[in-house]
Image: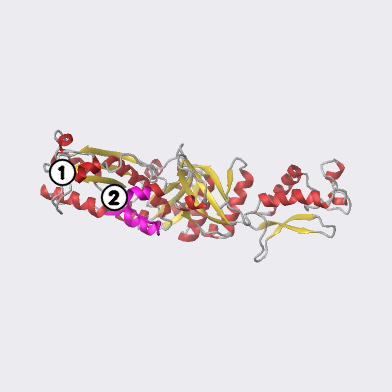
Amino acid sequence: MYVVLDIETTGGKFNEEGITEIAIYKFDGHKIVDQFISLVNPERDIQPFVVNLTGINSKMLRSAPKFYEVAKRIVEITKDCILVAHNAQFDYRILKTEFRRLGFDFERENLCTVELSKQLIPDLPSYSLGKLVRSLGIPVSDRHRAAGDATATVKLFKMLLDKDVEKTIIKAAIRLDPKHQMEPKLTDIISKLPSVTGVYYVHQADGEIVYIGKSKNIKSRINQHFTGQTPKSKKIQLAVATVTYDETGSELVALLKESEEIKRNKPKFNRALRRTIFTHGLFSFRDAEGYINLKVEKIKGNQKPITTFSNHDSGKSFMTKIVEQNQLCQKLCGLYKTANSCFGYDIKSCAGACISEEPAEAYNKRVLNLIESHTFKDQNMILIDDGREVDERSAILIENGVFRGYAYYNLNFQIHTTAVLKSILTPMEHNKDAQHIIQSFMRRHKRLKIIKLQD
């Protein structure tokens, strides 16, 4: 559990500042579960430049509670939590100073979103909160007021958790949490999980990930693991200390994250899924008469198919659909072995390419259009899918035929170029599995919005 906070102060000499406003959001990594926001009477003068910056003046603070009146609430809301702030060294120092004046030793583990941003989003021109959130498309209101800045920091931290593909932040939090060192009750773990689409991570007590999966309903899927009688389910039940998750909204993002993070983390109970997940591909060649033929066959060595399939039956089913949808020849697509005309010609669904009756140029044009629609080669495009919230969408970037990664963006933040998208992108590896997942998803989900880029 985290507490994301922002503090406004009077300004002045080092360690003589007083708090004028504080905002604390208790954040479970996905949503805010508690909050405390208050003006504070600092019992000292506010520097004029601070008044101009924040709009907070002494008149506003006359009836505000003094720090000792809100101290108990601050201790309670931050208990057993990791403190998160933008430039945490400053906020943490101010809090410790105020508590020291009361004779109380305030100690909390803390994380700085400035340092995390420099690690996870390198090479940005500025890491000040205002410029950083603006460049990442994070909406911010009431800048330089505690609630506004803390809200922006929550959204930034949520993005940083998503970009932390090594899961170092989450693993460290689990190791620090004493509750995760005790024998878990499986029903308690299930009760805290949501029924959302995403990727889930089964952790043992030291924070290490032992299993990764994806589901359209995480709660239901974990329930299956915890009630299952298979050898894998029983191993998971014995090893689990806690389950964390990343809500994706998009099933496509969940599939890509699952594949990438299994390869990266190599969980001991995911051995079967570390292997390549497809075996067959779609290939093309020209015959002696100049017609482009299509064929589904097993992928050998470093062959580069147009698109890929999990097995031969999946490829054959795909071929049957595209022959019908594009008025292609069953014989030239490997579905009807004959020395003469195909069955489609007999029932007037094939224009006669099988017996050279339809000109090769006309037939090949349809085949080339089909090939282009199912290959990444040299293409620049963004695939738009569901987000985690109503006003959010996910975006998958394909650049020069290479899968680059995914991002989430608010509907008010328009994406027209790869440069804009790259500023918020979580990079991922382009490999055969990722390409197969995307191509397969595009075949099965015609509603997927595709934006062709001209960068």
267 to 225, vertically: above or below: below
- Rendered location of residue 405, percent (x, y): 51, 54
Apparent side of residue 344 relative to residue 180 in the rendered image (left or right): right
Residue at point 20% right, 45% down?
Answer: 49
Closer to us: 165 or 364: 364
Q: Which mark is residue 19?
A: none
The mark closer to the camera, 1 or 2, is 1
- Rendered location of residue 411, percent (x, y): 47, 39
Of the two numbered discs 1 and 2 on the same chain, state the one appearing first in sequence: 1
Magenta segment range? 109-133
Closer to us: 352 or 11: 11
Residue at point 71% right, 47% down?
Answer: 317
Q: Secondary structure at mark 2?
A: strand
Crowdedness near tag 1: few (<14), some (14–19) or many (≥20) residues, C-alpha within 10 Å: many
User: Residue tagged by mark 1?
Assistant: 46
Apparent side of residue 258 relative to residue 83 in the rendered image (left or right): right
Q: Residue furthest top?
A: 63
- Rendered location of residue 195, percent (x, y): 46, 40
Residue 209 showing in the rendered view: yes
Q: CA distance from mark 1 to mark 2?
A: 22 Å
Amino acid type, residue under disc 1 in the picture: Ile
Q: Secondary structure at mark 1?
A: loop
User: Residue tagged by mark 2?
Assistant: 85
Asked if the magenta segment contains residue 336, the reply would be: no
